[in-house]
Structure formats: C-alpha cells, structure tokens
Image (tube, rainbow, N blue to C red):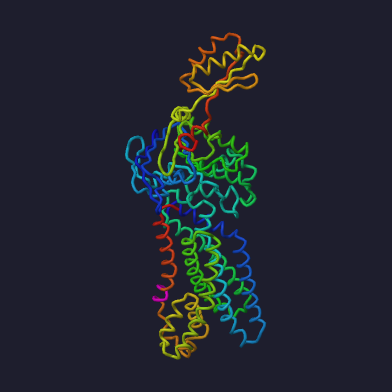
Amino acid sequence: MGRVAGALVLHELLERTRDRWVIVISVAFALLASAVSLYGRSADAEVAKLTGPSLVTLASLFAPLVAMVLSHDAIVGERERNTLGLLFSLPVSRIEVVAAKFVGRALALTLAIGVGIGAAIAASGVSERAALTQLLGPTLLLGLAFLSLGMLISSTTRRQATAASVVVLVWFGLVFFFDLGLLALLVLSDGAVPQQAIASLVLANPAGLYRVQMMHTFAGPEVLRELGMTAALPGASVLAMIWGAWMLIPNLVSGWFLAREKSP
Amino acid sequence: MKELTARGVFVQLGRVQALDDVSLTLNAGNATMLVGPNGAGKSTLLKVLLGLTRPDFGAFAVDGESARIGRDWKRRIGYLPEAVAFSENLTGWQQLRFFARARGVPRARVGHVLERVGLEGAARRAVRGYSRGMRQRLGLAVAILSEPELLILDEPTGGLDQEGLRVLWTVLAEWRERGRMALIASHDLALMERHVEQLCILQSGRLVAHGSADDLRRAARLEHRVWFEVDESDTARVRLLCEAMTKWGKGRVERRPGTVIVEIAPEAILELMEVQSGFPGAVRGLRVEEPTLDLAYDKLLGVA
C-alpha cells in the first residue's frame, strides 16, 4: 500500500470513529448485547444456552447496520463535499482510494463490533465466554460484506441522501425480507422449488449465511439437518471463498466504476 | 518547471464538447486566469491538468519535453476545488495532517501553513464550526501544503472576506516571486485582474482570446473615454470646443455640466489633444478612462 493509501486508511479510521451515528449505533449494540448476556447469566441454565443464539439475532441486525452507516458516504460524501477531485488529484489510483477507504472503515467496524461483542462476553457468565467468543469472526465477516456493499452503493450514487435511502432498502431487503421472500416462494410454489435450491439461496445472502453458520456453531448440525440445511452448508474453504467474494467483488466493482468515470 | 504546455485538448462529456481544441502555455513566475461563462469549460480544463478528466485528444509538455499526466505530474500540483467543504467531524489540523501524510510533507509544516492562511486559532476546532470563508482558507492551505510547482485554484475568491482575500493575494504574489506558476478559474474578473499576468477567455469549450489584460482590451477594440474638465464661465469657448470635436468626427462627444466627454479609439487620443489645444483656456484638466476588463470580456464574447 502506497503512502497516500496508508494516510487515507488512518484518515478514514479517525473520521469514522468521530461520526455520531456510528457511535450511537455501536453503543446501542454494545448495550443491548451486554443486556442479553446479563439476562442469560441471571436466568437458569436452559435460558443461558439461548444467550448465543439471541446475540446472533442481535448481531445479524446491528453488524450490517453499523457497516452500512459506516460505508454509505465513503465516495458520495466526498463527491458532495467537492473533495473527491481533491482526493483523486493526489498521486494515487482510484481503486487504491476505494481499497484504502474500505480498509479504514473496516478497522472502525472491527472496533464497533469488537466493543459490542466484547461487552456481551464481559457481561456473560464464565461458562458462556468461550462459546460467545466464536461470534466475533463471523460477525465481523458479516459486517465486512455489508461494508463492501455500502461502498458499492456509495460509488454508484450521485447524492448522499440517495445512497442513504438505497442502503436502508438493502438492509431491510437482505436482513428482514429475504428470508420472508424465500418462505413465500416455498408456500406459493407448493414445494415445486427444490429444498436444496432454497438452501442455496439462503446462503447467497450474507445475513442468511451468517445465521446458518452460527446456528451450526450454537445448535449443532442436527438442527440444520432437521431444517434441510446441512447439505447446503459448504466446507470451510468454500465458506471462506464466499465471504471473500462478498468483500472483494463489490469493492472491485466500485473501483471499476470510478476508474471508468471520465470526469468525477 | 519553467513552462507547461497543453496543445489541442479535446474533451467530449456525453453529448457536450466540453473542450474543443484548447491550447495553453503556463510560464514560471506567472499566474494565468481562466474566465468564461458557466459551462465554458474552465473547470474541465483544470480537471484535465489535474489528471481527473481524461482528454480525448491532447498533448502535454513540461519545459518542451512531452509529459504524461500520471503520478509524477500530480506530485507537482496543488489544487483548491470550488466550494470545498471537507469532513465535518475532523479539525482543520487533522484534515491538513492527512494531506501532509499523503504528500510526504513534514508535520511541522502543517502548523506553519495553517498560520500562513490565518487559521492557527481555529486549527483544533471541528470543521463543522467553520464559516465558508474559513473552509476556503483551509482548502488553500491544502493546495499550498506541499509547495507545488503549479497551483490550480477553482473559484478561489468564493466566500472569502477581506482578510481571506488578502491571504489569497499574498500567496499568489509569493508563488510568482518564487518562480512557480498558478492557474485560476474564476468569474471575478475585476478582483483577479491585478493579480494575474495572463487571461484566457473560454466560451463553449473554445479558447476565444488570451493574453494580458491590456492585450484583451486592445483585442476588444473598445473606445476610451476622455474627460475634459472645462471652464463653464467661458461658455462660448466651451461651445466652440464641442463643435470642433464633433466636426473632427472621430469620437462621440457628450456635454455635461463642467465636463465634456469624448468616446474615442485609443490611437486617436493624440489627435484629439491637438484639436483641444486650439482652444487655450477652455480646458482645465483631463482624464483618460480605459474600458474595464469586464467590458472587453463582454465584447470578446459577443454579448456587448
């Protein structure tokens, strides 16, 4: 990474950690996550087992939200402030700018997710801590996938308000309505769509992939088998490739989009 | 860098021919102003030189040697965009520190440059509390931070108060004194005229005229106004003077209380002096008024 890109990573981290919205959402996530942990700790053993799955539900809502709040203005914000040209006038390529912005914001996201899940781990009982620690990696991957999507939205829109609207729609679509849509597809097709296809579609959505992965971690493969998902959950290397693709492809498209823009 | 040349630059943006065969030479120690109506291509030309807009055709040279607009080129340029805003969450110092890191400028220079643009007192305040003029000054600080050989300023006077303008003029004077060059796009002809050596008028992507302010005035062929202060107590002599000037026929004569104004081509002024010398005592004093650069600009653009 060149000098300009390195400076941009630091700049982005500094700037994002001072954004009020990012701070508010991150603090809300940390408070809710620690409240769930505290409840699990104070309740009986059966309820305590549900702490992990409850945190998964919470994290599947908050991690994409924090990521998209962090990334939606990455490019379009600079465009509106008239600083995109200033940035591109530095001796740096446009794809490097996208990469540096992604890395800087990814560090801020790591901080937000680390604080949220860290607070939950700190508030949980000693017996739960090891299990809850397993949330960190996949939650970060989920966040990074949405961060990358946010970068794409930010690069392809001309106004920050438009980017914010699209980000909200994508968040609702992928986090809430995607599974409902699949359910509707199952009901309406009356079983004509193979279960394997539905399972693959679930995994095509980063939020779905995260939930299935976490279900596997906390409830075990037998629960997934009952849901017909085991066959669809790929091995570790394929999973890594899917997460990698979610992080790379939208960023590459962003870079390509900006690079082909004749006059920013 | 002693000379920077752009030759035959064409840029098509969608259906618009943003630049149409524009050629330009910038010289060390000179400031050049791009002027023209909205959409004339001023910002596009700046963006081409900044490496932001790819020209469809065009050749560039530095000191006579062919040059490519790449990273090395960009290292030599400082840029102030139009109505720059910056991130609201960071302080002026943090903003400038980022650009210093990116350009490899020592940390100590950040404070020096903030002082240079008169923002040392606001350096630790978040930009959200800055006025438009302060943001513009911060933008100027970013542009001069790495002491670039070419300073490109897009509408630099926007939002600046008297103090801000003084800072801008001082920076421009210093840049020229040190043998560097500046290229400025602005609508503010009257303000900028005294601070630039060369003006380039663009219209619909074409370079309509270029040269010094005097060159443009000459090219516009506008009449000068010669104001004669006359002795009203000798009305007969003043009347005769007016009649002689009218009869002479090379200027338009206007009579006002205490004054006779003649609109005339500059080359006929000496002849006019000879006409008025035939009426000794009628004229107490005179003043020659050049046409304003705004008028020359309008004439050259065909709007006057």
- Please provide percent x and percent y for residue B214: 47, 27
Q: Would you say the magenta stretch is mainly helix, strand or loop? A: helix
- Position above or below: A67 against A55: above
Q: Is residue B173 visible?
A: no
- Please determine whether, in this image, residue A231 is positioned above or below residue B208: below
Which quadrant of the view contains residue A121?
bottom right
Left or right: residue A137 compared with residue B68 = right
Query: B107 and A122: which one is in front?
Result: B107
Spot occupied by residue A75 in the image (x, y as percentages of width and height):
49, 58
A191 or A248: nearer the eye?
Answer: A191
Report the residue at 64% width, 72% height from top.
Answer: A31
- Quarter-wise, where is residue A195 in the image? bottom left
Range drawn in magenta: A237-241
> Which residue is drawn at the image coordinates 58% and 76% (left, top)?
A58
Asked whether, in this view, residue B27 is left or right of residue A180, the answer is left
| Residue A18 picture quarter | bottom right
Q: How many marks?
A: 0
Q: Position of residue A70 (x, y in %)?
A: 54, 63
Magenta segment includes B70:
no
Is residue B151 visible in the rendered image? The answer is: yes
Q: Considering the image in quadrants, where does the N terminus of chain B appear?
A: top left
Image-based side of B255 in relation to A166, left or right: right
Residues A76 and A214: in front is A76
Give the percent coordinates (x, y) of residue A119.
61, 71
Residue at screen point 39% across, 76% down = A238
- In this rendering, would B233 be left or right of B245? right
